[in-house]
Image: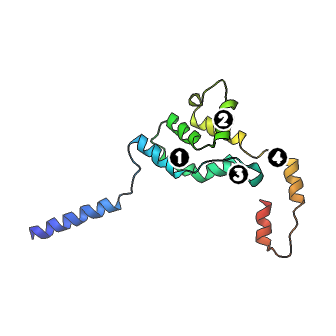
Amino acid sequence: MAELQQVVLLITELLQKLAQPTTAPSNPEQTLQTLISTISEFSFDAENGITFEEWYSRYTDLFESDAQNLDNSAKVRLLLSKLDTPSHARYVNYILPKLPKDIDFAGTVKILSQMFGTHTSIFNKRYQCLQLVKSEAEDIITYGAKLE
C-alpha cells in the first residue's frame, strides 16, 4: 500500500511539472541571445511595403512578453541590433547629439516608426484608391483586400 502511494505521488509530481508552462531563461543575457537569434533583421524598403511598423508588428509579442525581464537599455540594444547597417546609421545620425542608450525603448520605437514608416499624403492615398479597378479575374474579396 505504501508503494502505491509513492507511485501516485511520483506521477502527480511529474504531471504537475509537465503542466507548468515553459518559461524564458532567467538569465537576461541568455534571454537576449535567444531573442537575437529569433528576430530577423529589418531592412527598410518603402517601395515594397517593408516598413518598420510592419516588421515590428511581427515581433511585438516577443518584445512585450519574452523580453519583459530585460531592462530598458537591453531592449533598446536588442532592437537596434536587428537594424541593417544603413538603417542603423540613419537612426544614429537622426538622434544626434544623443546616443542610442539615452533614449528609452518606447521613444526608440516611436522614432523608428516615424523614420521608416510610410510617407504618403492622404491626398495621394485617396488618389491611388480611386485608380483601383477590379479585374474580371479577381473576386470581390481580393478586390476589397486591396482597398485596405
Residue depicted at 42% across the width and 41% down the height: 29
Q: Residues within 10 Å of mark 3 (few under 14, many from 20)?
A: some
Mark 3 — residue? Answer: 50
Secondary structure beneath label 1: helix
Q: Are marks 3 and 4 in contact (CB under 8 Å)?
A: no
Mark 2 and mark 4: Cα distance apart in space: 23 Å
Q: Earlier in the sequence, mark 2 or mark 4?
A: 2
Q: Which residue is mark 4?
A: 120
* Residue shown at the point (86%, 58%) measured from the top left: 129
- Quadrant of image for the N terminus: bottom left
> What amino acid is labelled 3 in the image?
Ile
Q: CA distance from mark 1 to mark 3?
A: 22 Å
Q: Earlier in the sequence, mark 1 or mark 3?
A: 3
Quadrant containing the C terminus is bottom right
Whether tag 2 and tag 4 are in contact, CB under 8 A, the answer is no
Q: Amino acid at mark 1?
A: Glu
